[in-house]
């Protein structure tokens, strides 16, 4: 099938490359010329395991092309995916500028041939119909001589950064929202090999469930899924705070409740809170939508509040052991919002840095993937070291912010000797207390 993907961010690029791997002819469009130039040379602008391999393979096979020419993309795609960003505005509303620009562009360039426009971006509930209206208005007002002959389908993504390629080939479910049987059948065909487990290690698995529903329900599924996961983490973080006060160990509690199949063991890792490009944005947008329709989403408001406070738990612990933070040097192990990604959007590390600087501390950091030049405006005051020992040198305490696998095997005894005070706050309960204590550290976890 001929597929166009508009927007080559995390979601669009992974989607485009994986669809090419399935054998579709994919043309990816992005208005960022530098990014497109990089992609045309087979280089990935993001760190995502498995992506460089499938990119290069599909480019070499000629099934994956990149361009800045939106008209060419719209002309090429029988199925046109829209995957431009939908960031939050300061009031929690979703910034629809990019989606509006793309819908308008589609309206300008689309012709009479039947097309399916697939909304992959996370959009406020009701946006599928809106996208259709914007495209039709643009078609009519731009002097485009063709009649509208397209349908909109919502196909939300559930990809986790760091395992986005794996998640694309092995999804728990595929959600398709729309009211056109023809468009929904085309989408089922597009994903046929994934549904029938062509890429599964265990080919006896039953087919991937496909949830076919209306547009509004599909859009709500995306928000509800992220809101539930964020709430599950805020829940276990609240339990962690209670554990600390009553002398229980949240890891034991999470294990004990997670074995109940009604609860499930995933997303019960307590720590210094969730971050990333999706949870904060999507929970805020859902709260905002509820408000617009006369409902106060109090549980979701609490989920966000608990998370904000949780990010500061590490500061409270630093104050407990160091008392005054002014003039102290604090080293952060990890900057990205989770391991195996280079993404720092809404990373808990950024909240920690802001608060530590406000309190007069000097902040250093080491991350396996983020270098000094990767620190954006407002965070350039953080010295990013090139290894963990340089980080430890002269620090009054370390805070493990991101659970990168290599942090398990650092030379902690050596690091302890380089520090002013060997203190480690493990914000992800990732290291073993005994090993750290044997290395000479005062070790503090979260909720244990
Ligand atoms: C995606 C989704 O689209 C978002 O709704 C979801 O909630 C999270 O995942 P992401 O892939 O992270 O967002 O977006 P981003 O990394 O910001 O990439 C968007 C891409 O679209 C960029 O490469 C940008 O250059 C491109 N773009 C933006 C266009 O090509 N045209 C535009 O008009 C605007
Ligand atoms: C999330 C959703 O999982 C994915 O389905 C959606 O499409 C995009 O948003 P992602 O943001 O890549 O994916 O990361 P995820 O693995 O969900 O982790 C989000 C945050 O929660 C991270 O900061 C992580 O450290 C934190 N987390 C996760 C915890 O604090 N505890 C846990 O048990 C799990």
Image (cartoon, rainbow, N blue to C red):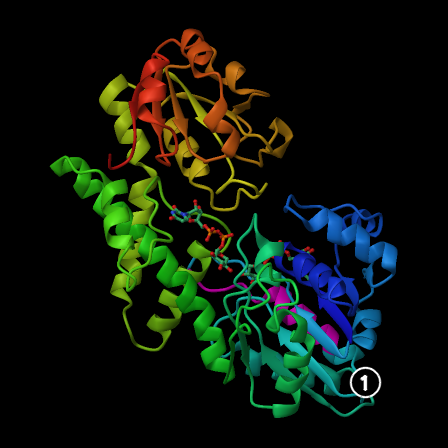
Relative to 369, 110 lies left or right: right
Give, as a single range, the part of the protein colored magenta.
Answer: 92-106
For mark 1, what is the residue? 111
Instruction: Please tell me which residue lies in front, 148 or 248.
Output: 248
Instruction: Please say whether residue 323 is visible from this viewpoint.
Output: no
Q: In which quadrant is the C terminus drawn?
A: top left
Q: What residue is at 66 percent from the left and 46 percent from the top? A: 46
Relative to 146, 290 lies left or right: left
The mark tally for this picture is 1
Instruction: Please tell me which residue lies in front, 268 or 100.
Output: 268
Say which element carries label 1. loop
Is 97 part of what is drawn in magenta? yes
* Farthest residue, direction front: 204
Is 60 part of what is drawn in magenta? no
Q: In which quadrant is the N terminus drawn?
A: bottom right
Relative to 343, 274 lies left or right: left
Q: Is residue 154 above or below residue 44?
A: below
Instruction: Please tell me which residue lies in front, 53 or 122.
Output: 53
Q: What residue is at 50 percent from the left and 66 percent from the top? A: 172
| Image coordinates for residue 204, horizontal then vertical, percent | 56, 68
| Image coordinates for residue 346, horizontal then vertical, percent | 47, 46
Q: Is residue 283 above or below residue 127?
A: above
Overall secondary structure of the magenta stretch?
Answer: helix
Q: What residue is at 54 percent from the left and 30 percent from the top? A: 367
* Farthest residue, direction left: 246
Q: What residue is at 61 percent from the left and 27 percent from the top? A: 372
Instruction: Please say whether residue 168 is visible from this viewpoint.
Output: yes
Residue 156 sits in quarter: bottom right
Q: Residues within 10 Å of mark 1 (few under 14, many from 20)?
A: some
């Amino acid at each position: 099938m001929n597929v166009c993907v508009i927007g080559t961010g995390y979601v669009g690029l992974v989607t485009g490359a994986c669809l090419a791997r399935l054998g579709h002819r994919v043309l990816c469009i992005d208005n960022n010329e530098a990014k497109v130039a990089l992609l045309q040379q087979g280089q990935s602008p993001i760190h995502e395991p498995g992506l460089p391999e499938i990119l290069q393979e599909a480019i070499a096979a000629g099934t994956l092309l990149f361009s800045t020419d939106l008209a060419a993309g719209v002309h090429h795609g029988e199925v046109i995916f829209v995957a431009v960003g939908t960031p939050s505005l300061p009031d929690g509303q979703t910034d629809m500028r990019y989606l509006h620009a793309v819908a308008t562009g589609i309206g300008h360039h689309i012709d009479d041939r039947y097309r399916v426009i697939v909304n992959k971006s996370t959009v406020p509930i009701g946006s599928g119909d809106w996208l259709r209206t914007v495209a039709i208005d643009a078609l009519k007002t731009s002097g485009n001589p063709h009649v509208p002959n397209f349908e909109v389908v919502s196909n939300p993504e559930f990809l986790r950064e760091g395992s986005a390629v794996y998640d694309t080939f092995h999804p728990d479910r595929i959600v398709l929202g729309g009211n056109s049987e023809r468009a929904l059948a085309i989408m089922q065909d597009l994903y046929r090999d994934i549904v029938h487990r062509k890429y599964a290690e265990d080919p006896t698995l039953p087919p991937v469930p496909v949830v076919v529903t209306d547009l509004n329900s599909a859009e709500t599924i995306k928000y509800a899924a992220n809101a539930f996961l964020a709430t599950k983490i805020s829940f276990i973080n609240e339990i962690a705070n209670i554990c600390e006060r009553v002398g229980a160990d949240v890891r034991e509690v999470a294990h004990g409740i997670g074995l109940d199949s009604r609860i499930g063991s995933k997303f019960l890792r307590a720590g210094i809170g969730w971050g990333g490009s999706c949870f904060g944005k999507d929970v805020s947008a859902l709260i905002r939508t509820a408000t617009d329709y006369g409902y106060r989403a109090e549980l979701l408001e609490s989920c966000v509040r608990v998370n904000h406070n949780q990010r500061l738990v590490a500061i409270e612990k630093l104050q407990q052991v160091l008392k005054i933070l002014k003039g102290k040097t604090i080293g952060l192990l990890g900057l990205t919002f989770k391991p195996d990604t280079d993404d720092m959007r809404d990373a808990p590390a950024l909240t920690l840095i802001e608060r530590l600087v406000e309190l007069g501390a000097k902040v250093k950091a080491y991350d396996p993937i983020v270098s000094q030049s990767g620190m954006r405006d407002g965070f350039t005051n953080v010295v990013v070291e090139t290894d963990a020992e340089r980080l430890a040198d002269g620090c009054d305490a370390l805070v493990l912010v991101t659970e990168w696998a290599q942090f398990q095997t650092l030379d902690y005894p050596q690091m302890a000797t380089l520090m002013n005070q060997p203190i480690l706050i493990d914000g992800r309960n990732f290291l073993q207390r005994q090993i750290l204590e044997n290395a000479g550290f005062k070790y503090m976890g979260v909720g244990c």
